[in-house]
Image (tube, grey):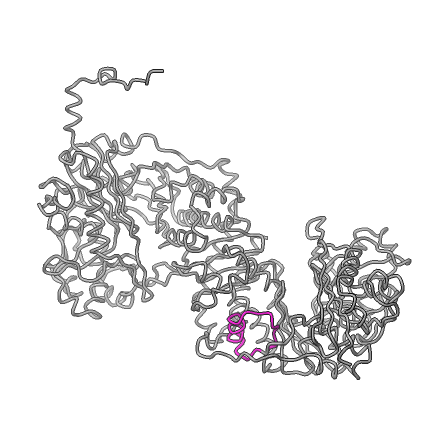
Amino acid sequence: MTTDYVLALDIGLTNAKAVVFDVSGALVARTSVSYPTERPEANAVEQDPAEWWSAVAQAVRNIAPEVRRRLVALGVTAHMHALVCLRSDGTLVGRSLVLGDRRAAEDARLLTARLGEGEIYAATGAELDASMPAAKVHFLKRRDPAAWTAVAQVLGCKDYIRYRLTGELATDPIDACATSLFDLRTGRWSTSILEAVGISERLLPPLASPWAVAGGLAEEPAKALGLRPGLPVAIGSGDDVVVLGFGLLDPGVALEHIGTTGSVMTVTLRPINDPDRILELYPHVLADRWVVGGSHTTAGAALGWAASFLGYRTVDEALAVLDGGDDHELTFLPTLAGERFPARVPEARGAWLRIPPDVTREDLMRASFVGVAGALAAILGRLDRIAGWQQSVRATIADNESWIALRARMYRRCIEVSETNEPTALGLATLVAVAASQYRDVREAVESMTRVARRVPVATGDGPEGTDPEAIFRHVWVEATRSGENHV
Amino acid sequence: MPWPLMPSAVQRGEDRESRVAAMNEPLWVGLDLGTEGVRVTVVDSQGQPRSHAVTHFGQRTQPTGGMVHDPLQDWTVGALTTLRNALDSIDSTRVGGVGVCGLFPASTFLDAEGQPIGEALLYGDSRAADHVPAVARELGARLQGDEVSPRLVWLRETRPNEFARVRRVVGPAGFVIHLLTGLATIDPQSAYRWGGLTDASRTQWCEAGLQAVGASRAIMPDIVAPGRVVGHVTPAAAAATGLPRGTPVIGGATDSLATFLGHGAVRRDDTIIYYGSTWTVMVATCDLTKVLVEPSLIDDYVPWRLAAYGLNAGRFLENLRIAAFGGQTSEALDAAAAAVPAGARGVAVIPLPTSRFHGGQVSPSRGAIVGLGLAHTQADVWRAGLESLGYLVADGLDGGPPPTGRVVAAGGGARSATWRGVVSAITGLSQHYHPRGSAALGAALLAARGLGAVESLDAVAEGWLPDAETTCTRSEGAEVAAYCQERRAWRLYAEAVSQLDERREGLLTGGATT
């Protein structure tokens, strides 16, 4: 059994990765091919799905033939909230509006007013903003009603790629949830939201389990990818499948994910409603549980910006500052591009606060790391209150020791370092392994394929004890945003 | 091709006698002991520059709230060395007098041998803050928190051994005069700003006040009005500096008064915008020539209104440049900032917003950079830093009638045309600037006036610095209006940051949320 391989196609916002694992979860091969992002007008962020497809095909062909020959199944995961429109013949209607596209802000406000904030949050697990496909559909219809008549199908990114692999239209509950068109309470497309947006359910793909087989790899794409036709293709899921890659099946352990954005999530046994509608809710792959979490728009992005601003070549180079001592008063607010936590404030901006007169660039950089860790700690604190105490936090292995130790200190709990540095692809691989009948179910696959490499304990006594990061962030945001309104 | 001939004295219409007279014409030395160093300028009686020297040392801040100079290394070595450097290139026998000014309020303590005890305490030193309310009550005086009187109590209470050795208390200008003459003196404005220790005439110490802080008349310097000869250079000082023995030393002034004089701003409503390590806006509240005659005519602490005050704000920006922005030159940053649109693309710099004197206490000093986005660069932040002075000036001047006199840009930062342009655009004020204008020049003017070489303190505006640059707003009202919104946002940010500072204690203990 251990000689069989599974292929996880992981489509991010800048590149497509083809990652091969053996069925014990060990990484076998990884390739990636990037694609461009277009910004044709203000607030527009578009990508061409044909470029995704070319990148996927190239990434797979770049895997050694002997590895490809041992594949027993494949699947796709991708960034969520992208909108792909197809004609009835399956051809593309324009480019995809991806995560950062803000042109539907007015549409989001309009739909929210029409449906009510509370109802949208209760139905979809998140507030409706410009990034959501529901708002984007409304925007496209409103902007060019004639062009919209050609649209026969709307899909997310991973569902488009899987459609190209198999010819089958489908989606899973997690990606469906990321459209703001899906009712978590019923597990079906929401008729009231569809009505408000003004589209028929026929435009949306049918729902299926993420570990189900969507179909066999069709002849033509098999040729393009250099794979065997008929290979089972799993339904897969949106990139929140990272939860499985970190081995999160049960409550009590959170995960943090620091990419451009930063997220902290955990598993709950009931659909939790955050009274402030700040945390977002997704269905877990396992039917009787849920994923609840919050995100910062700029986590890794804020570190990258701070490092560049202060003259470091890379964030890695800047990590050396963590060996110095903290100035517990100097604070960095990493909200450099609007924020989602602790409140949706599109106009929120970042800051260095309490700067001493003899500050150095090392101090400012160190404060930036502390600020990002503090921002994530604030989400974790809210999860503690709303979803129950989280014993530990899982993180990826590709990380600097001092940086992990700092986060453990800010989180005030142990960090469990996962063995993988490809948690999203590994999470998908567990589903693909189930689709390929390598495991009985998702729990068995996750327990067999994911592992914690080591635990980083909390260093006590050297942090601002008793700090409530959310209280500080909330206060600063409220004040800074109130002032920032004058700049926007 | 022959070398062009230098015009001869005859061609210039001069004769030998006038050249001899010029050779014999006295030179006037002005010394300014400031926060960042010592500056000495030497001019003739027409204000023409003859020599110049500067020594930088800078202040030191301490985690406990100290803001100090080293009186031996900074003040003694700094003053003597700078004088010697300035006199090296001229015929020092022509020096007719030395004028001295210095920062205030500040002080150091001398022992029986005239040697300094410990550090020199500068205006931003907050270690005596706990004593301010009690001392104010005891003296029946209005104290801002930075005066010398609570520092005397602080020294007595916390360092009794040092206090027991104190035989003299002097300010920075008084310290230099003591170095040169062996005599301890102070000008009336500085004495008054020592805090409730002078009598109603402001020319005498008040015995009861001194007793209240545990001091005696014997340790206090003599109060002497600026422009009076207070002593003469001793042989030891002559040897150390190159000044002729017996050169008259003219009674000192605060660096603020000398700044007014040294920029030709001596009339009521003349205004100084000071681009220094601490930003100040001072509007003269009377004819400054009067302070030389009758100090008690002044109806407040000093003969000017402090319209705005940014303690250490300039130093904060300068430190950002050197320690955080990779040491780029201010010229390079200014050039980059000039290309950034008004409002710094939403960035605001709040330089040390809490470093104000309020409630008799000096708050700790911390600044903020806010409004940051992913596209911002150091140029945006530098621009925001320059703009913050403009906002401070505009807000400060809002509290009174608009300045109707001459507005002068002074201090090291004023040499930046970009910065002056930004401040003019925000405030709508035209500013006069001359690179030779300085507090040291004001001190030299006091010396020349004190010894009768010039008739009027208007000499600087009228003849010494005749060719000042004037910085105006390019589009006058339109540009000022464009900044209105940004200025309002800056004020809101500053208030928000201050509130955060005040509430931070509660937030850190997990108590308060909004």
Residue B227 appears left or right of A364: left
Residue A280 appears left or right of B444: right
Up the image or down, A380 lies above or below A221; here it is below
Nearer to me, B327 or B367: B327
Q: Is residue A113 visible?
A: no
Where does the N terminus of chain B fall, quadrant-wise? top left
Up the image or down, B184 lies above or below A75; here it is above
Q: Is residue A420 visible?
A: yes
Across the whole image, how many numbered discs are drawn on residues?
0
Residue B311 drawn in magenta: no
Based on the displayed image, in which of its 4 quarters is residue A14 positioned? Answer: bottom right
As drawn, the residue found furthest toward the front would be A66
Residue A365 appears left or right of A83: left
Nearer to me, B84 or B126: B84
Q: Residue A189: give x, y in percent of width and height.
A: 82, 70
Nearer to me, B343 or B333: B333
Residue A394 drawn in magenta: yes
Q: Residue A151: give x, y in percent of width and height.
A: 86, 57
Residue sitting at 59 percent across and 78 percent down?
Answer: A416
As drawn, the residue found furthest toward the right would be A89
Magenta residues (range): A393-415
Q: Residue A330: give x, y in percent of width and height.
A: 45, 64
Based on the displayed image, in which of its 4 quarters is residue A178 positioned? Answer: bottom right
Residue B463 appears left or right of A313: left
Q: Residue A304: give x, y in percent of width and height.
A: 57, 59
Nearer to me, B366 or A235: A235
Residue sitting at 27 percent across and 66 percent down?
Answer: B133
